[in-house]
Image (cartoon, rainbow, N blue to C red):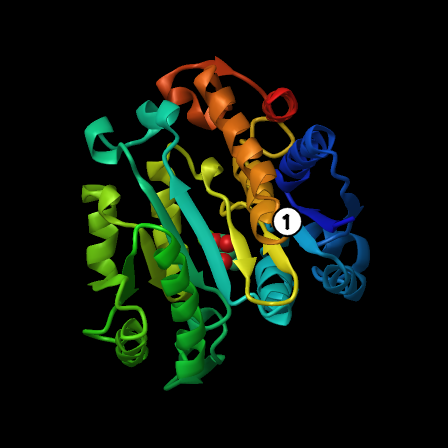
Amino acid sequence: MPKILLLPGDGIGQEIVPEAVKALEAVGKRFNRSFQFQEALIGGTAYDECGHPLPESTLKLCQESDAILLGAIGGPKWEQLPVHLRPEMGALLPLRKKLRLYANIRPAVLFPDLIAASPLKPEVVQGMDLIVVRELTGGLYFGPKKREIVDGEEQAIDTLVYRAGEIIRIGRLAFELARKRRKKLTSVDKANVLASSRLWREVMTELGREYPDVELEHLYVDNCSMQLVRKPTQFDVIVTENTFGDILTDEASVLTGSIGMLASASIGGEVALYEPAHGSAPDIAGQQKANPLATILSAALMLDISFNMHQEARAVEDAVRAVLKEGYRTPDLMHSGGKEVTTAQMGDLVAEYIQKG
Ligand code: IPM
Ligand code: MG
């Protein structure tokens, strides 16, 4: 029986994770599967309870589980803490690093019924179906950092470091993924300016020789951000370093209607972590306004990747599609009209559709 560790975290994380659990339980009923759920503290909520955003006990439970489902972390309440105790730098980043989750897979797929919710014109966004493979444990987020006084003035330094090996492993994963899809890989860098990007481009080009069946193109990140809104359908798989991937995936997500739609899987280590790409949205927390679909779709990725339950994963995606087709929308998707539902109602609807098939 797969052991799933739930880490709801902060803000809307507390509301969206239970909705993904409903979906997994519905999968269990329909396909005669059982999942074992455990829950642990992370983020500001963990800091409030035990003085650290990533308690040892949580890390241990993560390592002992078969997959992890995380909600979101962070919020204004914890922003003034010393950096190492903040939810982002004290919990999420170290967790990704400790579990060796170097690859973050973020599919940005337009559900046909959300075409009117996209900020792009229907004819531009129709058919958008891309995956961003974001390097997750290197680059600026993890390189040496420093704050110092130089000539009486404060200075701060972040270092962007990539080793060839780190680029090779993420590159290989992206090529393999592209090979199973439409066989086009876009590698995004800033090789006209950054040394790390020049190494990135060299390594990707070299790797490309092993994948003659996959078309490899290189784009500068500024161009890529423009191409994403100009013609998102030109992309199949995009591979890029940590910071660029963070930024480009927020952009890609909203093209699908809302950042509340973007699921993610962080893989590469022994146990994978699934989480929506959005944050904890403190402004709407506790109001049942959050969109649980990114988390529910992250659970579908879990079924697919960690448990090899492909049919079950398709059932979750089909249910999401059906609920959207029926016109149900959480507030973030209401700008194009529809029947407004709460977070829990959306979760109930998806679970219902999963069960009835
Ligand atoms: C994300 C988030 C995180 C990141 C933050 C919360 C540290 O923005 O998963 O995209 O930058 O990786
Ligand atoms: Mg982000």
- The answer to which quarter of the image holds residue 46 is bottom right
- The extreme front residue here reads 213
Judging depth in this view, the residue of 75 and 99 nearest the camera is 99
Image height of 210 relative to 125, above or below: below
| Residue at the image point whose x is 27% and y is 63% from the top | 213
For the question of whether residue 75 can be seen, the reply is: no
Judging depth in this view, the residue of 82 and 113 nearest the camera is 113
**Residue 316: where, in percent of width, then height?**
57, 33
For the question of whether residue 99 can be seen, the reply is: yes
| Residue at the image point whose x is 63% and y is 64% from the top | 95
Residue type, mark 1 in image: Leu
| Residue at the image point whose x is 54% and y is 58% from the top | 266
Q: Which residue is mark 1?
A: 70
User: What quarter of the picture does the C terminus occupy?
Assistant: top right
- The extreme bottom residue here reads 151
- The answer to which quarter of the image holds residue 303 is top right
